[in-house]
Image (cartoon, rainbow, N blue to C red):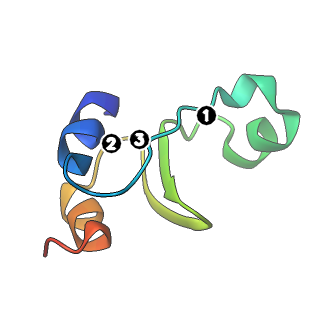
Amino acid sequence: MLEAVEQLCIGHNVAVEVIDIDTDSRLAERFGLDIPVLTAGSAELCRHRLDRTRLQQWLGRS
């Protein structure tokens, strides 16, 4: 998922940050086995697999 997200974000003023939830007990409890998760600020865009349409809408490409 990461590679696809990075490709879709090219040309947009966004930074992709990878967070290992196992290093944060709060995140591990919140997401458990529901990983990977793609968020934008406090908005959750998708879990498990990339929702390209949702990400493109968030990026303003729809």
Q: Secondary structure at mark 3?
A: loop
Residue drawn at (26%, 49%) of the image: 9
Question: Under tag 1, what secondary structure?
Answer: loop
Q: Amino acid at mark 1?
A: Leu
Q: Amino acid at mark 2?
A: Arg
The dot on residue 33 is: 1
**Residue 16 numbered mark, or none:** none
Query: Quadrant where the C terminus lies?
Result: bottom left
Q: Tell me the kind of residue under disc 3.
A: His
Q: Which residue is mark 2?
A: 49
Which one is nearer the viewer's eye here, 3 or 14? Answer: 14
Side (left or right) of 1 relative to 39:
left
Q: Which picture quadrant has residue 1? A: top left
Q: Is residue 19 left or right of residue 4?
A: right
Counting other residues with Cα less than 10 Å from the Cα at mark 3, is it few (<14), some (14-19), or many (20 or more)?
few
Marker disc for residue 48: 3
At 61% from the left and 34% from the top, the residue drawn is 33
Q: What is the residue that sits farthest to the right in this orientation?
A: 25
